[in-house]
Image (tube, helix red, strand yellow):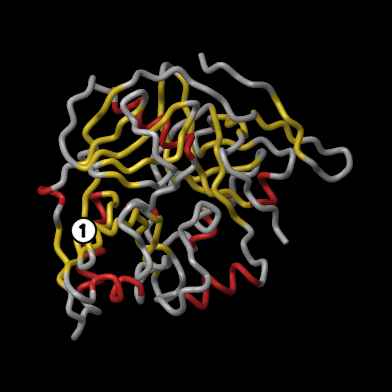
Amino acid sequence: MIPRQGLVAQAQPPHKVLWIIERMTTTLPHGACRLDDWGLIRAEGPDAASFLHSQLTQSVTDLPTDAARLGGYCSAKGRLMANFVLLRESAECVALVLPLELLLGLLKRLSMFVLRAKVKLRDATGETPLWGVIGSAVPELPTWGVQGPWLRLPDAVGHARAWHLGPIDAPALPRDAWDWAEVHAGLGWVRTATAEHFVPQMLNWELVGGVNFQKGCYPGQEVVARSQYRGTVKRRTQLLLGGAAAPATELFAGDARDSAVGEVVAAARWNGDAALLAEVQLAAWESDAALTLADGTPLTRAALPYAVKAPE
């Protein structure tokens, strides 16, 4: 069972109290597992950084070699077609690490806009296998810090985490343990089933540093900025316990089944427990209505490791 740290009551309208489980710790094994469902795109050439800077939600031209950044690529309607981690491998090489199922589509899409830019984009997944590492082998780096093949990720459920770009000699880590920590880190990755479903704020992407609002234009930038400054974000990604389902599975509130209030972003199981990240209407999240999966599985609200802003 997961050691619970207690319950906290969130501020609610009169007569309504929403109980949310606080952040928790989980005993996970230490070790490394191959993340063979993740891939890597390399952009190489004198214009690599400037080209990506013009296409992504994140600032790239000032990205240093010792730190990674989250980023996203949006449709003209401001919906995320993919999100990823950006690495500046050298002055003329930037890498994008993302779910493999979206890699070829993103590669093709970005390549359409290269035009006269001096940059070449290619699938480099086979050159740089990605490993997820939990525990004592993780170096003491700041979150998103980069040192050699190591990229430090946000801690989750009381454990240090990192990516290692390339093979590593470490005890085998069950993939379920990695997925459990990933869900509890609160990073929502776009998958094929959810591509173009979310503006970045619905995945809390600006809260975790994946959107730069000062960098200038990129596809969908006007929609993303309008969502931010006009207070039109009415859905957020949240952590829930008690169920697991595939991305895009619908969530419902109370007994109503005529209209979904959210959808699954990611899910994991560990030692008989289940947890998921889901994009949920803020009105439903803050109500006293029970949240369930489409099959009726009840879900318990839990706290993310970062604060989620209330609607303005």
The part of the image, by quadrant, that contains residue 256 is: top right
- Which residue is pictured at 10% across the width and 48% down the height? 126
The part of the image, by quadrant, that contains residue 231 is: bottom right
Residue extending furthest toward the right: 14
**Nearer-the-camera pick, 245 or 180:** 180
Secondary structure at numbered mark 1: strand
- The residue at which mark 1 appears reads as 41
Residue extending furthest toward the top: 1
- The three-letter amino acid code for the residue at tag 1 is Ile
* Horizontal and vertical percent position of residue 108: 20, 68
In the image, residue 258 sits, relative to residue 158, either above or below, namely below
- Quadrant location of the C terminus in the rendered image: bottom right
* Horizontal and vertical percent position of residue 212: 49, 66
In the image, residue 8 sits, relative to residue 83, either above or below, namely above
Q: Is residue 149 left or right of residue 84?
A: left
Residue extending furthest toward the left: 126
- Which residue is pictured at 38% across the width and 53% down the height? 190
